[in-house]
Image (tube, grey):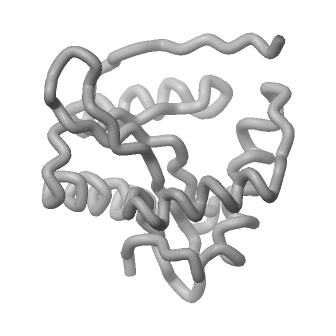
Amino acid sequence: MIRLGVKEDMSELLPLVKSFYDESLKNYGFDFNEEALKSVIESHCENNSGLVMVEDRIVGVIAGNFIQFPTSNIKIFQEVIWYVLPEYRKNGLRLFKETEKYCKAIGIQAVIMGNMANLNNDKMDRFYKSQGYSTLEVQWIKML
């Protein structure tokens, strides 16, 4: 089942996002702050901007921000996390497609997805292109 995330999902989402952090963000020098994460999760729940995939428990999440494109009135969903536990990744496409469907139903006109530079770049490039996406921007980071 795929549904909107709610605050009551917090106890299941925290370890899921911690797994995402361990797999990708830790290598960039970001710390893991559970209180900050709780605040972000609550915000996504309040804004209806996150979907969860539930099997016997929550096994995947996509969350993002609703923004207006800077040079037009186009409404965008900009993904900030897409993570599915490794043993459930074969179902990750379903979560992705449901997110697109949900966004379209609420009037979102474009979706921006990202990929961590240290994870499966070639595979993700092929995947996004096969789904009709094109490269918009490449980002760089430096911790100060």
Q: Position of residue 107 (x, y in %)?
A: 14, 51
Position of 136 relative to 16 (above/below): above
Query: Which residue lies at the image location 25% right of the left edge and 52% below the top edge?
Result: 100
Rendered position, 108 above or below 38:
above
Q: Kindly identify the residue that appears in the image at 28 percent across and 56 percent down.
A: 97
Q: Position of residue 12 (x, y in %)?
A: 67, 75
Quarter residue 78 falls in = top left
Using residue 125 as the reference point, say whether residue 101 is left or right of it: left
Percent x, y of residue 125: 41, 26
Q: Give the camera-side residue of 78 and 94.
A: 78
Using the rendered view, name the quadrant where residue 35 is placed: bottom right
- Residue 89 in sight here: no
Q: Quadrant of the C terminus?
A: top right
The image shows residue 47, relative to residue 33, as above or below, that is: below
Residue extending farthest to the bottom is 56
Q: Is residue 140 above or below residue 66?
A: above
Does residue 18 appear to the left or right of 42 in the view shown? right
Q: Quadrant of the N terminus?
A: bottom left
Instruction: For residue 28, say whether it is visible.
Output: yes
